[in-house]
Image (cartoon, rainbow, N blue to C red):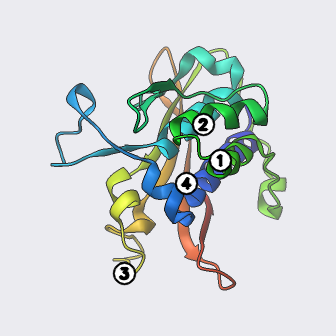
Amino acid sequence: ISLRSLLAASEKAACIAQLCRQEETLFSLLIEEKRGADKNKKFLQDFKTLADVLIQEVIKHDFPELQDHICGEESNKFENSLGEIVVVRVCPTQQETAALLQKVLDRKQMAAELLAAAVHREVMLSDPALDNVDVTICTESLAVWIDPIDSTNQYIRGCGNVMPVNGIYPSGLHSALVLIGVYNRHSGEPVLGIINEPFFQEELTAHRRGGGPH
């Protein structure tokens, strides 16, 4: 597993998070209230989004050698408005993934195809600083913890005009992060971490927000 591959995975995850926020009709479909054992007691209302689940499944798909050692907090079971339980996963082809997502999205084909395209796209990183860094780690004793969208409540409800405090956004859309942590699965010691800020900056050409990994 390499630093570049982890960064690419985090950037793909960020693109999925951005897409779900950009498409207002899509975004309204992707919110499901957590109930029972899945409910986070910190909030009166806590939510699981399809973006969360998709990002988690993308990481599993992109690192098959770590398939049994990738952990996250989200269940990949999703209930649509018809009461159908769908197990969300990344299928072998984009078309198959789109067909699966249509079941979650109440047969809305365009929305499913947009998400499937983001899931299956190949991310190309162009960063001169990264070209000078060669970090590759043997996966034999590694495990990965993924928090697909940290601060999910802020991701769903967050405003884009919150001002930073000492360079850190205390709340709002900017505080939603994609977190990937690599650790030794035997000792629990941390090895490598990726923080991606999907909504770090606003593009001037459109009402979209973009970010990047750190």
Q: Which amino acid does label 4 sit on?
A: Ala
Q: N-terminal of the two: label 4 or label 1?
A: 4
Q: Is residue 190 above or below residue 157?
A: above
Q: In which quarter of the image is the C terminus?
A: bottom right
Q: Position of residue 51 (x, y in %)?
A: 51, 46
Q: Mark 3 points at which residue?
A: 163
Residue 1 in view, yes or no? yes
Foreground mark, 2 or 4, reads: 2
Q: Position of residue 157 (x, y in %)?
A: 34, 63
Residue 102 % position (x, y): 60, 38
Question: Which residue is under mark 4?
Answer: 17
Q: Nearer the viewer, residue 81 or 27?
A: 81
Q: How far apart are marks 1 and 2 (CA)?
A: 8 Å
Q: Which of the numbered marks, if any, corresponds to residue 101?
A: 2
- Amino acid type shown at disc 1: Leu
Three-letter code, disc 3: Met
Q: Are marks 1 and 2 in contact (CB under 8 Å)?
A: yes
Mark 2 → mark 3, Cα distance in angstroms: 36 Å
Determine the CA span between mark 4 and mark 3: 21 Å
